[in-house]
Image (tube, rainbow, N blue to C red):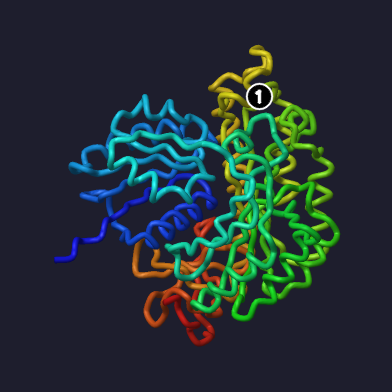
Amino acid sequence: MTAAPRTVYIETYGCQMNVSDSELMLGKLAAEGYVQAEGPEGADVILVNTCAIREHAETRVIGRLGELKRHMKPGTIMGVTGCMAQRLGPRLLDQARHVSLVIGPDGYRSLPALLEGAREGHRTAVTDFDLEEHYADVLPIRGDRVKAWIPVQRGCDYRCTYCIVPSTRGPERSRALPDVVREVQAVAEQGITEVILLGQTVNSYRAGEHDFADLLRAVGAVDGIKRLRFTSPHPNDFSDRVIAAMAEVDAMCEHVHLPMQSGSSRTLKRMLRRYTREDYLACVDRLRAAIPGLALTTDVIVGFPGETDDEFAETLTAVDAVGFDDAFTFKFSPREGTPATRLPAELTVPEDVASARLEALIERVRAGARERNLRRLGEKHEVLVERGARRGEALMARTRDFKTVLVPAEGYQPGDYLTVELTGTTGSTFTGAPVASRAALPMAG
C-alpha cells in the first residue's frame, strides 16, 4: 500500500516578495512529493513565512506560532522562514521550543533536507546569505491564476537608517535577464496575462550589460503578456532610459508605487533616503510628463526621530502636491540593529504625537483620493477580473492604473477582460457597469 504524500501548510506575512518566496518553497517541496494543505490542521509541515519590517509584524508572528502549536500532531515539523527568521536566527529556536527550523530567504533550496533532519530531531537555524541564489531553476506553485509575481532582484544596497531589509535580505543582486524572460514566457503559456516584477529597489536592476529599461522592453515583448507592473522602485533610479521604456512598452501599466517616506528634506536626510523633497517632486513630474494619466501610490512614515511639526506639515503639502491615489502609512518603528536606533533619545517623537500625525496623514490622503475619484465617475476603462469580492455578489477587477472596481459576477470570471463605466465610488473602490467585453483569456492550468 502506497503511503500518503506528506502535506505542507505555509502561512505568509509581509510583502509581495514573501508571497513569491512562499510560492518558491511550495514548488521546491512539490518536487519532493509534498502536497499543499489548505490549513494547518494535521499538516505534516507548518511553515510561517515572516516579515521583520516593523516590530508589530514580529509580535504578531510570535503570537501566531503559539496558536499554530495546537494544530501540530505527533511528528509535525514547525518552521519559521523569511525576514524575521533571518533577523533572529537561533534566538527563535529558544523563544519557541516547538519550532524546529529557522530559515532565512537564501536557504530555501535546502528546505527538503532540513525537514528530513528535523524528523531525526535536529533543530536548525540557516541564515547565511548566498549572493548567487535566485532560485531560477525552481518551479514555483503559484497561488494566483490571474497575475504572477516575478522576482528579478534580491537584497538592497541603499541602507536607509530605519530599514532592516539590508540585514534580512542581504546585498543587492540582480537575476539574469534571459532567466526572467523564460519565467515570464512560462507563465504566459499557462494563460497568465499580468506580471509584476519584484525587487527591493527594482528599478536599480542591473545584470551584466542589461539595465531595468532593457528588462521592461524584454518582458513587455513576451507574447501573451497584456499587463506589466513592478514594485518597489526607488526615486533615484528612474533614468531617462527607464522612463522612456515605461512610456513606450504597450503592456506597461499606468501606475507606479513610488515610496516617498517623508515630504521634508531634513527628515529625508536623517532617513538617508538620498534625495530631497525637490528631487522627489521632480521625479514625479518626469514620470507624469512621459506617461499621461499615471497614477501614483506611495509609502510614508510619520514620527521619525526628530520630525518636527513643520517637517510633518511639509509631508502633508507634498501629499497635496503629488495627489497620491493611495498611500501605505506607518508610524516609525525602531528596528534592532538599524542606524535610526542610535539617534539621540531626545529626538524621539512622543507616541501620542505620532498617532495624531498618522491620523491626519491618512485623512489627507483619503480626502484627496476621494475628491479625484468622484470626478472620474462616467469614465470607461478596461479592467482585468482578479477574484471574487469579499462581500456581495460581485467580482473584484482592476484598471490599468490600479483602481479597484467591483463588477457583476454573472457572466464573468477571473482572467476576463472587459470594459466598464465607472458608476459609483466609496471614495477608494469603484463600482463598474460592463459596456463591452473581450473573450475570456485562457486560464492557467
- Residue at the location (59% across, 44% down)? 130
Question: Label 1, on which residue?
Answer: 340
- Residue 259 showing in the rendered view: yes
In the rendered image, residue 198, in percent from the top left (x then y), is placed at: 61, 56
- Residue 380 showing in the rendered view: no
Q: Secondary structure at mark 1?
A: helix
How many numbered marks have been drawn onto this rendered protein structure?
A: 1
Q: Quadrant of the N terminus?
A: bottom left
Q: Residues within 10 Å of mark 1 (few under 14, many from 20)?
A: many
In the rendered image, residue 347, in percent from the top left (x then y), is placed at: 67, 17
Q: Quadrant of the C terminus?
A: bottom left
Asked where in the image residue 249 lies, by quadrant, the reply is bottom right
In depth, the one of 373 and 153 nearer the eye is 153
- Residue at the location (53% across, 52% down)? 16
- Residue at the location (64% across, 69% down)? 181
Asked where in the image residue 195 lies, by quadrant, the reply is bottom right
In the rendered image, residue 267, in percent from the top left (x then y), is placed at: 74, 29
Compared across the picture, whether 220 is left or right of 47 comes to right
In depth, the one of 214 and 436 nearer the eye is 214
Compared across the picture, whether 209 is left or right of 121 comes to right
The amino acid pointed to by label 1 is Ala
In the rendered image, residue 365, in percent from the top left (x then y), is placed at: 62, 46
- Residue at the location (58% across, 45% down)? 328
In depth, the one of 312 and 50 nearer the eye is 50
In depth, the one of 296 and 202 nearer the eye is 202
Please tell me whether residue 11 is drawn above or below residue 98 in the rendered image: below
